[in-house]
């Protein structure tokens, strides 16, 4: 593993935060049942290793994180808790009880292995307005996980989301030509989001290599990364994986300042 200079992004006027998604610690636990490995322990390790927040996706079928995990994370972990959730009233009610720091509205299909794309705000915006208002009235920040698309950004502003998280999956998985095209879309969307007063986050499929170009987009203030970090942790340990990712994104950001 390449050694990187650790840069404190808090000293910069353009900080970048790392949200660590610990869902797949729970996936591994659920493969055998029982209590190990414990997602809350993973959150504590991430917190000590450079994570700025903890992200979990409480799916409707509870395939990894479950309701008790969510309760313990809120009660036992001091970092901000970001709850990814489907746009259902069941999830809204759970969020109202747990009161995470933030929720991220995502599309969800039971048959998918992982989130396959962004939430279509253009189609569902009218239905989401009440949910957004209700969550924000409780002091919960509301994000929409969307594809990097100008129309989606415009609707995000109209329904008064606090932030958007740009789906980076196409960029991460594409050919060099597709990466270049998608990176341009992400840059354009991030710029428009901030011009509209929205905070801009990004995530999905990011690793130590492809994250650099995303971290160098100054308008992006937060990256949410999970699956890759848990995979790398099998060989390097979770603390090492999180601290290395934190160093990578901060060094990428500082190189432009």
Image: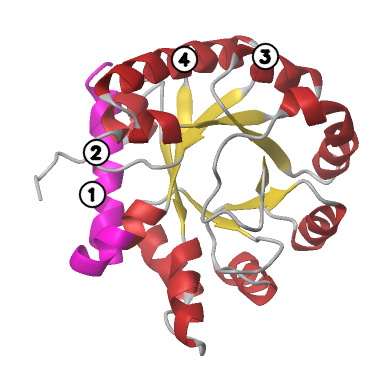
Q: Which residue is mark 2?
A: 248
Q: Which one is in front, 27 or 21? A: 27
Residue at 35% over, 34% down: 172
Asked if marks 1 and 2 touch (Cβ < 8 Å), the reply is yes
* Of callouts 3 and 1, the N-terminal one: 3
> Which region of the structure is painted magenta?
231-257
Say which element carries label 3: helix
Q: Which residue is mark 4?
A: 185
Question: Foreground mark, 1 or 4?
Answer: 4
> Label 2 vs label 4: CA separation?
23 Å
Say which element carries label 1: helix
Q: Is residue 21 something that shows in the picture?
A: yes
> Label 3 vs label 1: CA separation?
35 Å
Circle 3 Cα neighbour tier, 10 Å, few/some/many (<14 / 14–19 / ≥20): few
Q: Which one is in front, 64 or 72? A: 64
Q: Residue 244 got which mark?
A: 1
Q: Which residue is mark 3?
A: 151
Asked if marks 2 and 3 touch (Cβ < 8 Å), the reply is no
Circle 4 Cα neighbour tier, 10 Å, few/some/many (<14 / 14–19 / ≥20): some
* Of callouts 4 and 3, the N-terminal one: 3
Left or right position of 108 against 80: right
* Of callouts 2 and 4, the N-terminal one: 4
| Rendered location of residue 109, percent (x, y) | 66, 51
Asked if residue 251 lies in the magenta stretch, the reply is: yes
């Amino acid at each position: 593993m390449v050694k990187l200079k650790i840069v404190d992004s808090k000293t910069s006027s353009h900080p970048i935060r790392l949200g660590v998604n610990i869902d797949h610690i729970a996936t591994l636990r659920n493969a055998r049942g029982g209590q190990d490995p414990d997602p809350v322990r993973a959150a504590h390790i991430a917190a000590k290793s450079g994570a700025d927040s903890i992200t979990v996706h409480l799916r409707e079928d509870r395939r990894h994180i479950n309701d008790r995990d969510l309760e313990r994370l809120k009660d036992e972990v001091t970092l901000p808790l970001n709850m990814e959730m489907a746009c259902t009233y069941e999830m809204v009610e759970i969020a109202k009880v747990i009161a995470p720091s933030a929720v991220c509205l995502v599309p969800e299909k039971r048959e998918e292995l992982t989130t396959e794309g962004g939430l279509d705000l253009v189609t569902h915006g009218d239905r989401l307005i009440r949910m957004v208002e209700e969550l924000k009235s409780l002091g919960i920040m509301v994000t929409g996980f969307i594809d990097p698309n100008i129309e989606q950004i415009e609707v995000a502003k109209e329904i008064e989301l606090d932030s958007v998280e740009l789906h980076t999956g196409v960029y991460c998985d594409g050919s060099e030509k597709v990466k270049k095209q998608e990176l341009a879309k992400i840059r354009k969307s991030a710029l428009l989001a901030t011009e509209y007063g929205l905070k801009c986050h990004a995530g999905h499929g990011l690793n130590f290599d492809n994250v650099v170009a995303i971290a160098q987009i100054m308008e992006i203030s937060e990256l949410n990364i999970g699956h890759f970090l848990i995979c790398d942790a099998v060989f390097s340990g979770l603390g090492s994986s999180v601290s290395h990712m934190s160093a990578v994104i901060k060094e990428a950001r500082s190189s432009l300042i």
